[in-house]
Structure formats: C-alpha cells, structure tokens
Image: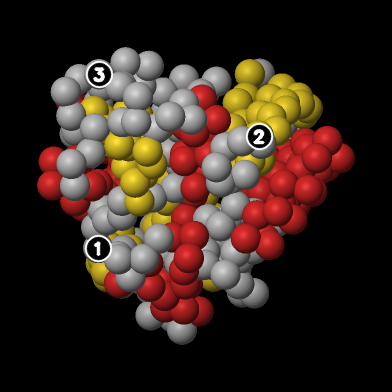
C-alpha cells in the first residue's frame, strides 16, 4: 500500500515519541507509504496552571485532534489511551490499540527514598486524583501537591517546587529514556493505574477503509481486550479526571482478569474488586465489575464526589 497519510498528534516529547513509534510500524508494514506529521495543541496543553479535575475531562487532550479528523485535515490521530474519552464522536472509531508498556505508576524521589521510606508529611507531586486518593489511602500522612506539565517539566518541578517525590506513569518515563530517574515502580496493590495507561491508540474516520487497513496490523488483541474492559468499567461508573477511578485488565490465554476501584479524593473511602471473564466480551466484564462496586457503596462515593465539585 502506498500514498500519503497525515498523522495528527500533540506536540509534547512523549506524544511525538508515540507518534514516531506508530509511523515506524506503518513504514515497516507499508514501505511505499509517505507519512506527514501535523502537531495540534489541545485545551489540556494550553491550560497548564489549572488542576485537571477543575477543567473537566471530556476530550481535554483529544478534542482538537478529533475535530481535525472529522474535518479531513488529518487521516489518523495518535493518542495515549488514558486521555481518550470512553465515548468517541460520531464518525470516528478506534482502529488500533498498540502493544502496551508496563501500565503502572512509578515513584521518582529527590533523595532515592521509596514510598515506604518517605518521611511523615512528605510532599508528593501528582496531577491525578486517582493517584492522590490511592496514595493517601495507603499513607494518610503525605502532603499531595498538584503538579502539571509534560514529563520533563514535572521532573524539573521535583526540585523547584521543593517536593520529596513525584508519581508518574512508568510508560512515559520509559519511552523518553528516563528510567534511570525511577526510584521504584509502585505495586498495583498500592496504586492501580488509570484506564488505558501505557497503551497507544490510533483513531480514524469510521468510513475510511484505506486507513483502517493500513492501521489494522498495529492492533494487539490482548491489549485491546484489556483496554476495552477498562474503558467499559469507567464508562459504566461515569468517571474521569474528576473522579478517582482506576482499573487494570490482564489477559492470560483466553481469560481476561479485570481489577478496578473507586475512591473519594481524600482516600478515606476506597472500594476495590476484581472479576474474570472471556476475552470475547471485555465490555460485559467491565460493566459487571462496575455494577458490583456500585452495589457495594460505589454509588454513594460517586455521589459524594459530585456534590463536592464546583
């Protein structure tokens, strides 16, 4: 397959790395293909001095890319799956979910101390309510400090904001060659990841069969099943950046195991559960797990969180 395609992406180092990874795979599969990259700034890239939970999360890092897709200005958009809302605009579809990096979080501390070794009252930076809730549930003594910006910016703030540690996605650090900065990878028992974390998604126009055929070989069925279950779980709960929700799907053979949680932002109330099912029905598994948590008190937690929102 030959010709030219225009690929849309955000302009951060991590977004460009992920886009380059997709382009390399496309060129390996289709040597005659010409790829042109268009960088697009999203609302989330512009509002760097406001906490994510206060902005709202409907397409914060994706809407402008999707608008360009619908307008025919680009042929595909490369996303971090954790940024992609569970409901896609009419006319767009997810053509591939690429093989996943380790999906968990990592602690980067100023003096090499692990999470357990941080002193009482240690200042820990993160932009995520999900991380904040889980870390406070595990260590209520910590002082959680809002920190936004791309990965290099946040690493700089470890020093400039007088922080003891940062919590970041392992995948972003790994992809930027910054693994040497990691003090420890946080166990899932302490911090379950964001829905879709560590996976790259490729979004296209629903009727564009040419681009769909180009992108299809990039899809990883195991990652796709896990992420679809996580996204279904999140959608049923109605969560996002404004609600501390986490989930992780893992595939072994034909079995898909899904673990999820919902919590209050202060971490005082946290519900966690897991279910297993068939890889053939990931959405059904996500819905069942969400409904189990809702029945066990998750609805009350979600209502409490919504009432606190401005």
Q: Quadrant of the C terminus?
A: bottom right
Q: Residues within 10 Å of mark 2 (few under 14, many from 20)?
A: some
Q: Is residue 246 left or right of residue 102?
A: right
Q: Residues within 10 Å of mark 1 (few under 14, many from 20)?
A: some
Q: Quadrant of the N terminus?
A: bottom left
Q: Nearer the viewer, mark 2 or mark 1?
A: 2
The residue pinned by badge 3 equals: 113
Task: Spot the residue most to the bottom.
Answer: 71
Q: Which corner quadrant of the image does residue 38 belong to?
A: bottom left
Q: Is residue 159 left or right of residue 52?
A: left
> Which labelled disc corresponds to residue 270?
2
In the rendered image, residue 170, in percent from the top left (x then y), is placed at 34, 32
Give the mark count: 3
Secondary element at tag 3: loop
Labels 2 and 1 touching (C-beta < 8 A): no
Q: Earlier in the sequence, mark 2 or mark 1?
A: 1
In the rendered image, residue 206, in percent from the top left (x then y), is placed at 60, 68
233 or 305: which is nearer to us?
Answer: 305
Labels 3 and 1 touching (C-beta < 8 A): no
Q: At x 30% / y 37%, what residue is drawn?
A: 123
115 or 208: which is nearer to us?
Answer: 115
Q: Earlier in the sequence, mark 2 or mark 3?
A: 3
Q: Earlier in the sequence, mark 3 or mark 1?
A: 1
Q: Nearer the viewer, mark 3 or mark 1?
A: 3
The residue pinned by badge 1 equals: 11
């Amino acid at each position: 397959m030959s010709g030219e395609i225009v690929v849309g992406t955000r302009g951060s180092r991590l977004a460009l790395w992920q886009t380059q990874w997709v382009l390399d795979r496309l060129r390996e599969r289709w040597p005659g293909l010409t790829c042109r990259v268009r960088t697009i700034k999203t609302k989330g890239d512009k509002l760097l001095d406001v906490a994510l939970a206060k902005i709202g999360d409907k397409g914060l890092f994706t809407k402008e890319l999707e608008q360009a897709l619908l307008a025919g200005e680009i042929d595909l958009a490369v996303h971090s799956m954790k940024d992609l809302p569970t409901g896609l605009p009419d006319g767009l579809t997810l053509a591939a979910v690429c093989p996943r990096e380790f999906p968990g979080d990592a602690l980067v501390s100023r003096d090499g101390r692990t999470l357990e070794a941080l002193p009482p009252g240690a200042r820990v930076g993160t932009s995520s309510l999900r991380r904040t809730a889980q870390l406070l549930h595990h260590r209520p003594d910590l002082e959680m400090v809002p920190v936004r910006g791309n990965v290099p910016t946040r690493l700089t703030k470890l020093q400039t904001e007088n922080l003891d540690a940062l919590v970041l996605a392992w995948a972003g650090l790994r992809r930027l060659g910054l693994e040497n900065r990691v003090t420890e990878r946080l166990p899932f028992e302490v911090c379950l990841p964001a829905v879709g974390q560590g996976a790259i998604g490729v979004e296209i126009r629903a009727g564009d069969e040419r681009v769909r055929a180009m992108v299809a070989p990039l899809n990883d069925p195991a990652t796709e099943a896990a992420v679809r279950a996580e996204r279904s779980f999140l959608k049923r709960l109605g969560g996002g950046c404004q609600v501390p929700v986490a989930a992780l799907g893992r595939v072994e053979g034909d079995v898909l195991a899904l673990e999820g949680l919902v919590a209050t932002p202060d971490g005082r109330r946290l519900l966690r559960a897991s279910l297993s099912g068939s890889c053939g029905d990931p959405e059904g598994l996500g819905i069942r797990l969400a409904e189990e948590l809702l029945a066990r008190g998750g609805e009350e937690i979600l209502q409490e969180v919504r009432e606190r929102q401005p």
